[in-house]
Amino acid sequence: MAGILDGKKIVVMGVANKKSIAWGCAQSLLDQGAEVILTYQNERMKRSLDKLLADVDVKMFECDVADDANVEKTFNEIHDAVGNIDGVIHAIAFADKETLEGGVKNVKKDGFNLAQDISAYSFISVSRYASAIMNEGGSIATLTYIGAVRAIPNYNMMGVAKASLEAEMRYLAAELGAEKNIRVNAISAGAIKTLAVTGIKHHGDLLKMSEGFTVNGKSVTPMDVGKSASFLMSDLASGVTGDVIYVDNGVHLIV
């Protein structure tokens, strides 16, 4: 049966393990017929991906988003290997433990800059170099969280970084839409027990609170998010750009 992404080449950045939202995205893209290309930060992460992808034929490329030159090199290598791409999913964020746990008032400049650099600026860098090798009418999506627009307990500096990310998404949508008809959107995923969430203080309470606010009493899964990502990468979403799509089982209706 034909998928909505047949013939499309999509780069997914940020798969850490089988619980990653990015992995849910990659699985859904594959189910819909896409050729998926993954990036990884370093050799340690590659070893983890090798185990995860033992039975899946997926090309992988190293990419450290902390370095613009490395991001440019990665997308040049991807272009050399597969030609033009049709989409990118950016699922990358980081803040050190002290910055996450200390509250916004106590954030130090170095911690602030690191969180913004990896979690927000990297989206600009990725969009710049990905769009250079992207077909017209392509799609770029990033992952955000309701902590960008609400003061969620213990989300702290990451909420500030996600607010920057959402603002960037809107400006990039305007610029890249005018240049190459490339759509840019964000998915605001509900709280899911991933490696990233476990770095947040009292993350168990956050997960319980989020589940309690859903309309059906169930947290979303990485695959739920992945299905929406597949839609945004597809031509079915040809008129959707500059938007935040909530995939949280209604949490944003109440919080």
Image: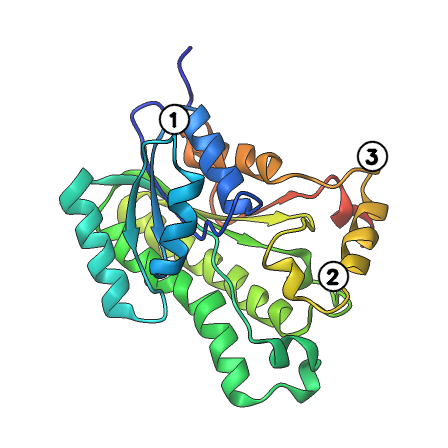
Residue located 42% across and 22% down the image: 4
User: Which of pointers 1 and 2 indicates the residue nearer the eye?
Assistant: 2
Residue 234 is left or right of residue 132, and the answer is right
User: Which of pointers 2 and 3 indicates the residue nearer the eye?
Assistant: 2
What mark, if any, has residue 203 been given in the picture?
2
Please tell me which of labels 1 and 2 falls first in the chain.
1
What secondary structure is found at the residue carrying circle 1? loop
Q: CA distance from mark 1 to mark 3?
A: 30 Å
Task: Mark 2: give few (<14), some (14-19) or many (20+) Cα within 10 Å.
Answer: some
Q: Position of residue 117 (x, y in %)?
A: 44, 73
Depth check, front residue: 199 or 136? 199
- Amino acid at dot 2: His
In terms of image quadrants, where is residue 102?
Answer: bottom right
* Residue topped by disc 1: 5
Depth check, front residue: 214 or 202? 202
What secondary structure is found at the residue carrying circle 2? helix
Residue located 56% across and 69% down the image: 161
Residue 104 against residue 26 in the figure, above or below: below
Please tell me which of labels 2 and 3 falls first in the chain.
2
Q: Position of residue 173 (x, y in %)?
A: 42, 52
Residue 224 is left or right of residue 67, and the answer is right
In terms of image quadrants, where is residue 255?
Answer: bottom right
Task: Mark 3: give few (<14), some (14-19) or many (20+) Cα within 10 Å.
Answer: few
